[in-house]
Image (cartoon, coloured by chain):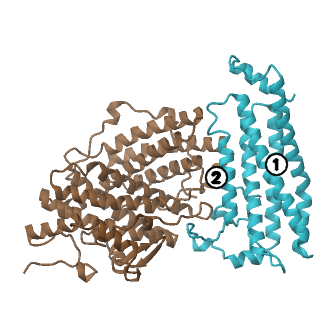
Chain colours: A brown, B cyan
Amino acid sequence: MGFNPLEERGIDVEDQFRNWSELNVDPYDKVHVDPYTRARVILMNGIEVESIIFSHQVSRHTDNLEIRRALALSRRVDQQQQKVVNGLNPGDQTPLETTIGYEQVAVDLTSWLARHEPDPMLKQALDFALLEDFDHLYRYADLYDLLEEGDAADLTGSLTEITPGRPTFTHHRHPYDTVRGHYSTHTVDPLSRLHVMTITAGEQQTMNFYMNHGTDWIEPLARGLYAEIAQVEEQHVTHYESLLDPLDSWLKQLVFHEYNEVYLYWSMMQQESDRRIKQIWELHCNMEIGQLHAACELLRRYEGVEPLEILPPALPDTPVTFESNKEYVREILATQYDLRTDGTDYVNVGDLPKDHRYFRFQETVNAGGVPSEMVIDDERAERDRDYRDEDGANPIPELRQIVAA
Amino acid sequence: MTTLTPTKATGAIAQPAEALYIDPECQISENAVAHTIDLPGVNGAFVADVISAMLAHERCGAHLYRSVASRTNNPMLERRYKELGEETEHHVEVLEQLVTSAGGNPNYVSAMARLVEGTDSKLLESTFMLNGAADIMTEELGMLDAVFLAESMDHANWHTFAALVDSLPDGEIKNACAAAVADVEDQEDEHLDWARSTKRRLVELQATSAIAAKAEMKAEEMLAAVRNWLS
């Protein structure tokens, strides 16, 4: 039997508060950091932000003081956890470098989840958005070369290829086509539930980051690129959150949130190469176990539901792992490059009728120039090539490097 | 051993719909559902869906009773909620056995069952998510109202099912359904009668007595008053 957080004591929520010095952690060294340590920091920051915002939403739907106080208690600790995790990012890491970290997270997290996802529909949802985030990494890497003369491979450690995916200008679809069907809370595999919650939180954090950092720039091209890709992240949050079953009550959702946080901190602990940061994951895992117990107590008391009715007997055997997924991404790019969405279905772009709303939406938003194309045009004009970090030729012939004559 | 929350681990199955994906491992077709109640002149799929919805309501009822039994401040209400909760869990067992004996899966969750669960979930939430403005006497009435509403639906479900069973062709399925109705129907009458009469007693008690909550009443006095209700 694996690790069952319900059988672990953890740390009582009241005992989890830290002082200001403990919150003001030393950041990692941006030059020497393991790219996947940066990825873990980005992911867990997003997980904490989701936990905090979700808790606020629950609080706005109840005036039960006992529940509100329990939420406020755990939420304040989550805020402290978020400060510690996000505080690991160094101040000399530029917003564009952080952005490239975000897109590496998106590519390697989505790939890993898709590779381990038991439900074919959910795997399809992951594969579909994977190719879009993969392309965002390429566009931002070119912007990084253009504006900061930076080599994105230094940030990714060449663990993730940088080459065009499904081109960003094709991502812009009518909002109706960003809504998916959802799983059933009764039939969903526990691992699938955790996967969907994780990717929703991760994409939401990316959306939030671009919403707030898109104006850090003077250059219109950079501002335009962030605005364009931020809209795709909005699509991705809609895409992923619509996979969640709305039948679950607020308190059940709270328990699932805490359980997922335990799973993820436990996962991060397994693979962290930085001893100091590993200790943070371990501490936070024990804190989340305490928060899980508190949430379970609310569920038991107010809904009469025993947590084991809705939770698996142990965490999944396999921790969520940041690792290279180059072959997997190439395979998905080769087979799903032409995929689009039509209502809740996935279709080949060639099968969409010519008057489909997808094409009308494309004409509207792409009129007057597309920043994600302009950045590549400018890069080619400046350097006689676009920036890539490839292990071989792109699997799609039309996406292969154009070398100036 | 009854199941109060069907999950993949307990063998839950469902039919997909436009907005609802079901893992292929857990899918069941309408034809397969219909085959459970395979009788001439009967819409077997619909009847199977109705039974699934009844089962969902009983399961939610068991959760409701657990919740209110642990939160009431009145010992008599607590004891009665526990008794009714045990009987409700027995009704879950009766329905699960009925479905199993017909060759079906008691953890089939029909679309109708999802709607019922949604209704019941909000009914239960109404007893605690919005009680910030309520004193403990009002909270008790709120919990009792939720029980009354749940039992009203339960009562209607079983009476409707009893009438449906009467119209089924003779045979094993009819006999199994009739046995389930015979096992449960009288208890459902009692549950609703108790909820209705207790609601009336508590309302009358507070409307005509000095123990009704007053603004100046201290919490301890109110708690003592609630504890003495019905004694």
Viewer-side residue, B210 vs A20: B210
Q: Is residue A163 left or right of residue B184?
A: left
Q: Is residue B20 left or right of residue B101?
A: left
Q: Which residue is mark 1?
A: B86
Based on the displayed image, in which of its 4 quarters is residue B57 positioned?
A: bottom right
* Picture residue at 66% right of the left edge, 68% below the top: B13
Q: Which quadrant of the figure contains the C terminus of chain A?
A: bottom left
Based on the displayed image, in which of its 4 quarters is residue B195 positioned?
A: top right
Q: Is residue A297 left or right of residue A48?
A: right
Q: Is residue A107 visible?
A: yes
* Picture residue at 81% right of the left edge, 36% below the top: B77
**Residue A308: image tag:** 2
Q: Tag 2: Cα neighbours inside 10 Å, few (<14), some, or many (≥20)?
A: few
**Residue A11: image tag:** none
Position of B171 relative to B138 (above/below): below
Q: Tag 1: Cα neighbours inside 10 Å, few (<14), some, or many (≥20)?
A: some
Based on the displayed image, in which of its 4 quarters is residue A200 positioned?
A: bottom left
**Could you tell me which chain the residue with mark 1 belongs to?**
B
Q: Residue A118: percent from the left, percent from the top?
A: 51, 70
Viewer-side residue, A278 vs A161: A161
